[in-house]
Amino acid sequence: MLKDIEVSSNAKLFSVSKNVEFCETDMAGIAHFSNIFRYVEYAETRFFQQGGMSICDPAKDQKWPILSVNCDFLRPMTFGDEILIAINVGRIGTKSLVLNFFICKKLSDGREEDVSRGQLTVIHAKASGEHGKIATAEIPPDFKSYLREYLAAVDCDEITAG
């Protein structure tokens, strides 16, 4: 559960909620696995915005492409489920960071059930001067300060799912 993750990692969790939409489900009414990544991006975008940063800001020539992602699918989500998507920071580098993500659904009795967790490695990039090319860039100091508030004391793999 999300509260257990926050206690075990000593890091703040950023979280947002949404409902699983009908168009995100298959013929069995189960959310298609690919939507996990949409849900995570939904939360990641708001996490960055809260820190004063945009995922993609052409005016500031800033981009945050995903370098790698891993995900464990623990339980299914179905149409109408209210889900919570939470993020904390696993690692902050000079030009990249690792975001841990956790998704749970709210049950009718008020409890939460873990449905997915994983990590994203994201790089900070700017245009390299060549058309369409990008190059890594240092993470801005003010955004790094914001990220440190969410820095986990443990890796995602060390957190026991409930």
Image (tube, rainbow, N blue to C red):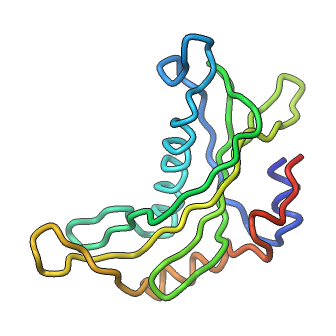
Q: Is residue 7 left or right of residue 123?
A: right
Question: Where residue 60 sits: x, y (%)?
Answer: 25, 74
Q: From the viewer's perspective, is residue 15 above or below residue 112?
A: below
Q: Residue at x 44, y 69 (%)?
A: 52
Q: Is residue 143 left or right of residue 135?
A: right
Frontmost residue, 44 versus 66: 66
Question: Where residue 8 sits: x, y (%)?
Answer: 88, 66
Question: Where residue 61 sits: x, y (%)?
Answer: 23, 73
Q: In this view, does 90 lie to the left or right of 106?
A: left
Q: Which residue in the rendered view is the most extreme toward the left?
A: 131
Q: Which residue in the rendered view is the most extreme toward the top?
A: 27
Q: Which residue is drawn at 75% across and 70% down?
A: 155
Q: From the viewer's perspective, is residue 157 above or below residue 40?
A: below
Q: Which residue is drawn at 15% across and 67% down?
A: 132
Q: From the viewer's perspective, is residue 91 above or below residue 141?
A: above
Q: From the viewer's perspective, is residue 125 above or below residue 25?
A: below
Count of marks, rendered view: 0
Frontmost residue, 115 versus 87: 115
Q: In which quarter of the image is residue 134?
A: bottom left
Q: Which residue is drawn at 21% across and 66% down?
A: 58
Question: Where residue 148 sits: x, y (%)?
Answer: 64, 80
